[in-house]
Amino acid sequence: MVNETKSPPHRWRLELIGVSKRYSGVTANENINLRVAPGEIHGLVGENGAGKSTLMKIIYGIVRPDAGQILWNDKETTISSAAVAQKLGIGMVLQHFALFDTLTAAENIALGLSGRPSLDWVVDQVKVVGQRYALPIDPMQHVYTMSVGERQRIEILRALLQSPQLLILDEPTSVLTPKAIERLFDTLRVLASEGCSIIYISHKLGEVQALCDRVTVLRRGRVVHNCKAAEESRESLAVMMIGDDPPVLQEKEPPQSTKKLVEVEGVSIRFDDPFATPLENISFTVREGEILGIAGVAGNGQQELFSVLSGEIEKPDSGTLRMVGRNVAGMNPFKRRRLGVNTLPDDRMGRGAVGMMPLHWNLLLTNNDRSHVRYGFIRFGQVMESTEKCISQFNVIAPGVDAKAENLSGGNLQKFLIGREILQEPKVLVVSQPTWGVDVGAAAAIHQILLDLSSRGCAIILISEELDELFQLSDRMAVMADGNLSAPVVRADFDLDSIGLAMAGKTADIPSQEATYASAI
Amino acid sequence: MTDILSILLTAIIAGTPLLYAALGELVTERSGVLNLGVEGLMVMGAITGFAAVFATDNLWLGVLAAGATGGALSLAFGVLAITLRVNHVAAGLALTIFGISLGAYVGKPLVGQSLNLTEAQFSGGLTQLPLLGPLFSDIHPLVWGSWLLFGGLWYFSVRTRAGLILRAVGESPRAADAIGYPVMSIQFLATGFGGVMAGIAGAFISVVYTSIWTEGMVAGRGWIAVALVIFATWRPERCIIGAYLFGGMTIAELLGQAMGLGVPTEFLSATPYLATVIVLVLISRKDSRMRLSVPAALGKSLDIKG
Amino acid sequence: MLLRFEARSKPSAAVFWLSPIIAVALSGCVAMIIFALSGLPPISSLVTFVSEPISSLYGLGELFIKAAPLILIAVGLAVGFRANVWNIGAEGQIIMGVVCAGGFALSYGGSESAWVLPGMILLGAIGGCLWASIPALLRIHFRANEILTSLMLNYVAGFWLIYLVHGSWRDPAGFNFPQSEPLGQSALFPTLIEGTRANASILFAPLAVVLVWLLMNRSFLGFQLRARGVSQRAALYAGFPANRAILVGLLCGGAAAGISGVAEIAGPLGQIYPTVTPGYGYAAIIVAFLGRLHPVGIFFAGLLMALLYLSGDTAQMSLGLPPSIAGVIQATLLFFLLSAEVLVNYRLRRGDRVAVETEAV
């Protein structure tokens, strides 16, 4: 389905010269120069906030640049909308899928194609193209029943059905198992060999190195480097990305105590909601001073597990849940915090914090013990004091105590929120994706905070999609797949391959003969 | 036999304004816009329709005027709710009170007036058909219009690509926009359509159903129409059933009085409203079924940035 | 779309304070246009419209007794609105307050006891609360949308009152008019300002303003309600029970509405009519929004709305316009205010319309 030498060979498929884009007060892209050759796989790396997504939206026509030129197949063009981009031959697979859950895969793809293809044609093509590029999808299946990996395949198919000359993928592997990532790379290599150019956006340097021909590094909206992928090492790329050597973590000492602070036994939940993943027979324990890492691809029940632990789901259907020696089933988060069980979810905006409220109100959200609330009335002096303490102790860069949460950068807000929980001196802390969307410096600070907390005796449950993070911090690690939790493995026995296999679980994004059921490791 | 038929017919006629308004609101809500101003729109449609017919003795001019008024006002509401992203509930209530007040204001000189409209009906060949003839001669063209509307809407939502796009917009405006659809324009179109239908519904009440202008004619039917859409889980085929059921309720009080039942008339008057509450409770309970039918983005506004 | 919105990095304080003034000014312009279209001199008509009702002490008293229920109810409703609980049933809750208190008054009003009036107030509040608890419970247990249930109950309550006043409560000496007996002296509020109809019940309004301000801004419960109003998921995460917000939100409005119903029958009316609430329940919703859901704002918005009602009445006498013009101006005012408020957080720019995800740059 890819354009095969329909036109005379061009020097560059896509060229950006001096492209810039500002939002109020923030420069997203500054004077960007980029060149992608036909059939080239071009990596675009940078931290969150470096400007990668904005640049791609400019190329895809969703955003208009403030300055600069765009040349397509050596001709200057204006890309004024997604439809125009599609006509030119640019396809984009978004990081956050633009899918409609209540429609079928074919209907979704049909909606995304300009021109008005008949639904029957789409169904047909899905089968043909899916076969050709090893992206099997049932066109008549409703999206809400599909796994995340399958949904991404729909997005890719949609882009491929347009016969793109340039395919842009934005952080495609954050939702895939290692096996599925390999398959994706195979697909991309086939596409490139047929003449389709690929822009691969990622912050995962290992992948970029494995896949890409050339790499462009963005930092703070500018291009800081452009080279052949083979010329640089992961370390040197990382240094370019953050402008600094990545900080080194202290070695982690194994926990000494045997006292169990979290005991989960046989917890299962079914949901009415067809969008939720049921939990099956979850069992694990966490000791004082121990960090239990829970790995897994998003959508396998981590959200639900977090909610059961935090108290947002008060009771499981079956099983027992003990924390700090007490049975906490039936307790809401407020009551669990009184026991010393604190949590921090992955969505900081709109759940962990309220964006439009100032920091001191956000502090009060979870930090509302007797020192802050007396006889039903709020003690503002104390709240302000605690907020200031949180800001200074955890190095939060904020315009002031009454700054709105949404005005802080991701990393700073996250530091504030973790600080908020830690100031309550929890005995148990459950965190989910603590460094998502956080710059490398803040991420390292957060990791150190967690390590320090753990060494003070707090039991920590760390739910994360970043294997690096889990490997660095965990004393033991388990894997969530399909609502099941594998038996935890101790640090000495951590092994990337077996964990990757466990992550694949039952709904393997891999052909069935390769699937191995997650067995006790 | 003819008694049952005439009861049925009465229920249908009573339910017709509900059907028009509910089908219109259904389309609006399918695009993600919650328009609670239906009552106000119906009042405005009622007075403009009445006034137009009063002045010209022409039914269709009345319908046109009513539809245009409803459409225009709903677009003003759309500016608030869609473009300016004002809270849909607040904007809808503003529209309701505006419509009711303005309708009363403009209609003041016409209070108590009645229309001399000759019964609009089909004539000629169709009425001569054996069994079906009376269907054409006895049933008002606007009722036929409502049936055509229902049929058209059903086909639209189930069979056409445009219907699919509408559903997509109401489920996730963000996603629809990401793949290039003009979400705001679609929402405006849907809102305008709902307004036109509400206007026509109001005109039906003032011109066909009663033919006299008094204040408070619409009597909460706009609100019942809003409830009807939920009752029908946003599906046209259930809307039509619900509309006639509720139309039937409204005339239950007349029946009750006629049959000399010992039930106080006020209780009978309250029945449709109580029934709506009960229905609302019944269908809201089944969590999963509701979730899949509700336009997921109903009432929320698309985040527009530069 | 040629215009688009750009989020401001900080909400504009200027627009925040100016927008009510702008909205009022624009509505004034609309009023003048309506006057002109009716053949009246715009500016002098507007002046008459606005100033005549309050040009006398009696008029001021009328202003207060009209504003007091609006403010009282709006302040109670605002508690719920800020928690994302939408009580549209104030109209019915007023009526149920009247039903409960009125029943009590008709039975015991003859006695000279000083407990009659406090009893009525209490029963009025209870009546309103009970009626409001129906949509609350239906929402809690069945997830039924409270906007629609509370609204439908307005009509049910209205018919109930009609039934009572036509039936067992009918005044034997009333020539068959649908009205109750006049309430006994001990069931009436004493006059507060001599020479006017303003009675002691108007004090409920400022009292409610203070209480609600304390609740929403200083108490932890108020914080829980506000958090829920802004983000239900954050409130869930914080462990603030949703049911508590629903109950408190609806019952506050119910109690306030019930009490204001008592104030009506034990005040200016002195009797119970079926039309005991000429749309106050809905008007209070507008007042709540005009006051931006803030107690102090509502206080002023209530006075303004009451003035408009009075102006509508005088408009009939002095300008020859139907009283429904009041409703038109009120809705226009709300329309302009809601529009202007958007500009607090967003600014208008020319250019292509483009929607962007709010995620990371």
Image (cartoon, rainbow, N blue to C red):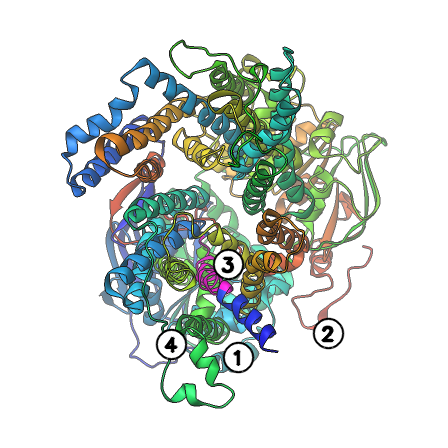
Mark carried by residue B171: 3
Which of labels 4 and 3 is toward the front?
A: 4
The percent position of residue B170, horizontal first and vertical second, equals 47, 58
Chain containing mark 2 = A
Task: Report which residue position mark 4 lands on.
Answer: B121
- Write the residue at 63% across / 60% down: B259
Secondary structure beneath dot 1 equals: helix
Q: Which mark is residue A123?
A: 1
In the displayed structure, A170 sits above or below C314; it is: below
- Graded by Cα atoms within 10 Å as few (under 14), some (14 to 19) or many (20 or more), the crowding at tag 4 reads some
Q: Amino acid at mark 3?
A: Glu
What label sits on residue A513 in the rendered view? 2
- How crowded pointer 2 is (Cα within 10 Å; few <14, some 14-19, many 20+) is rated as few
Label 2 or label 4, whichever lies nearer to me, is 4
Image depth: mark 3 or mark 2 in front: 3
Vertical position of residue C210 compared to residue A420: above or below: above
Magenta part of the chain: B14-33
- Label 4 to label 3: alpha-carbon separation: 41 Å
Q: Quadrant of residue B275?
A: bottom right
Q: Quadrant of residue A221?
A: top left
Marks 1 & 2 on one chain:
yes
Left or right of residue A102: residue B117 = left
C54 left or right of A518? Answer: left
Foreground tag (1 vs 3) = 3
